[in-house]
């Protein structure tokens, strides 16, 4: 499914910036229902942002899990905050070696496992519009100096009571404050196809999604035009904890 550039989530300068409403509610309690009947989380709720593996020996298993705090959740946009110091789950090679240190030719076929690891960089704001085959991440240096947007091409997210699940599509785009942009990880995208993790038709759809994202960038549409780089988290928000059952199978999922 290819995203469009015309839908926006509203300005980041609206009243929900940094809102702590709903803080302290458990993710497993389940979100509230919006006027259209869609399940929604309140600002301040803590959920899980997860990615499933596509390696041949672990297809469908969760291999990335990041506890995040909800900033906004509407029919048009899900915005979440991953705080510095958040304990996450990430994949590593079976002997503990970081994945990026494995030669590209065997990076996606070498045996893997998962480990818990803390996010030690500055926090990350993640923005996702329902149905779009990408999410947009905002990165800052320490001191809140804005660095860039990162367009992560991925399977449109599915929702469950405790968070969202997706599958990464390897290819990404970096976007800079001067509105320049560049493709990222094209070598990994090509290797994923050579390794049999992505067939020609899916690769074509991913490229199509990337071109649609570039159209949004060139038009400087949402979320790039919405001022999210000026957003700041509520200082009352804590760092979400990583639950022991971070890889649990949801009882029910929706798009």
Image (cartoon, helix red, strand yellow):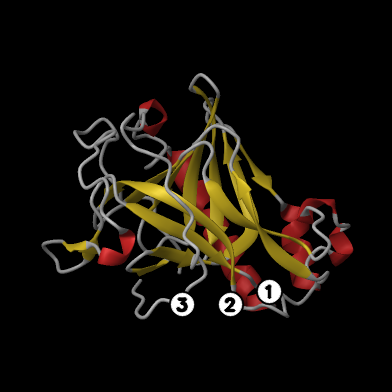
Name which residue lies at 46% across and 57% down: 49
**In the image, farthest residue toward the front:** 244
Q: Which residue is mark 1?
A: 198
Name which residue lies at 35% across and 30% down: 231
Residue 191 in the image: state x and y as whole percent: 79, 64
Dot 2 surroundings within 10 Å: few (below 14), some, or many (20 or more)? some
* Residue 6 or residue 132, whichever sits in front: 132
- Foreground: disc 1 or disc 2: 2
Instruction: Tell me if I can see residue 156 in this picture.
Output: no
Calculate the distance from the C-alpha at mark 2 to the C-alpha at mark 3: 10 Å
Name which residue lies at 79% across and 52% down: 100
From the viewer's perspective, tell me whether residue 222 is left or right of residue 200: left
Q: Which residue is mark 3?
A: 249
Residue 14 in the image: state x and y as whole percent: 21, 33
Residue 211 in the image: state x and y as whole percent: 55, 55
Q: Which residue is mark 2?
A: 60
Q: Earlier in the sequence, mark 1 or mark 3?
A: 1
Question: Where, quadrant-wise, is the N terminus in this rendering?
Answer: bottom left
- Foreground: disc 1 or disc 3: 3
Residue 207 higher or lower than 223, as above or below: below
Question: Do residues under tags 1 and 2 come within 8 Å of each other at their CB atoms?
Answer: no
In what element is the residue under mark 2?
loop
Calculate the distance from the C-alpha at mark 1 to the C-alpha at mark 2: 14 Å
């Amino acid at each position: 499914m290819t995203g469009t550039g015309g839908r926006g989530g509203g300005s980041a300068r609206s009243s929900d910036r940094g809102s702590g409403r709903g803080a302290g509610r458990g993710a497993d309690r389940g979100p509230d229902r919006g006027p259209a009947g869609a399940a929604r989380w309140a600002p301040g709720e803590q959920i899980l942002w997860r990615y499933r593996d596509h390696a041949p020996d672990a297809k469908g298993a969760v291999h990335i899990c990041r506890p995040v705090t909800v900033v906004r959740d509407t029919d048009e946009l899900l915005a979440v905050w991953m705080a510095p110091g958040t304990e996450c789950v990430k994949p590593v090679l079976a002997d503990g070696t970081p994945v990026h240190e494995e030669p590209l030719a065997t990076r996606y076929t070498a045996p893997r496992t998962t480990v818990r690891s803390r996010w030690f960089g500055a926090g990350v704001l993640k923005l996702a519009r329902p149905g779009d085959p990408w999410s947009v991440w905002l990165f800052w240096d320490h001191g809140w100096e804005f660095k860039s947007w990162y367009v992560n091409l991925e399977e449109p997210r599915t929702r469950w009571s405790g968070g969202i699940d997706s599958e990464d599509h390897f290819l990404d785009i970096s976007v800079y404050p001067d509105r320049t942009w560049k493709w990222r990880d094209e070598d990994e995208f090509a290797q994923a196809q050579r390794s049999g993790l992505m067939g020609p038709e899916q690769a074509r759809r991913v490229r199509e999604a990337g071109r649609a994202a570039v159209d949004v960038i060139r038009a400087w549409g949402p979320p790039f035009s919405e001022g999210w780089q000026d957003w700041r988290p509520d200082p009352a928000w804590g760092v979400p904890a990583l639950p022991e059952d971070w890889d649990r199978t949801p009882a029910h999922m929706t798009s």
